Amino acid sequence: MLPDQRLRPILLVSYQRKYYQNAHGVRTTWDENIRYRRLNTQMLAYGPVYRDELGVFEVKADATIPKDVLLDQVPLNHERFSKYCRGIEHSGLFIGF
């Protein structure tokens, strides 16, 4: 980044999160009702709200527990999910390189 360039927020991401923990200390979060909205230069939301039809279930555990053991216990699709990237795509802010 050049010294005369400043980064500024361009996207507002909001969601509802639920927290869980099992008896073995494995923690999970469930994010739903994910919404994206553009931000103007004054950091005010404008334009339509884009609601994501997907939710995110994330497993958080001690590093001593092997990843494959954790993934075997979760009967869901395992894939990368970035709220920021999805928000950029849904709000029309994506700029190709």
Image: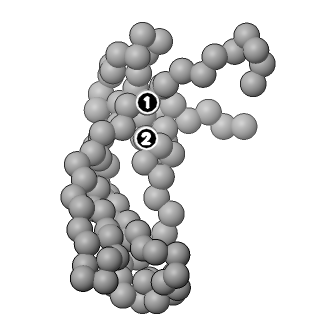
- Which comes sooner in the sequence, label 2 or label 1? 1
Q: Amino acid at mark 2?
A: Gly
Q: Is residue 80 visible?
A: yes
Q: CA distance from mark 2 to mark 1?
A: 7 Å
Q: Name the residue that disc number 2 marks.
A: 87
* Vertical comparison of 24 with 11: above or below: below
Q: Which residue is mark 1?
A: 11
Provide residue 35's location: percent of width, then percent of height.
Answer: 30, 41
Q: Disc 2 vs disc 1: Cβ atoms closer than 8 Å?
A: yes
Instruction: Indicate the quadrant containing the C terminus: top left, top right, bottom left or bottom right.
Output: top right
Q: Does residue 96 sit above or below 39 in this rendering?
A: below
Tell me the quarter of the picture where residue 20 sits: bottom left
Color encoding of the figure = one colour
Q: Write the residue at 52% across / 81% down.
A: 64
The residue sitting at 24% across, 82% down in the picture is 23
Residue type beneath disc 1: Leu
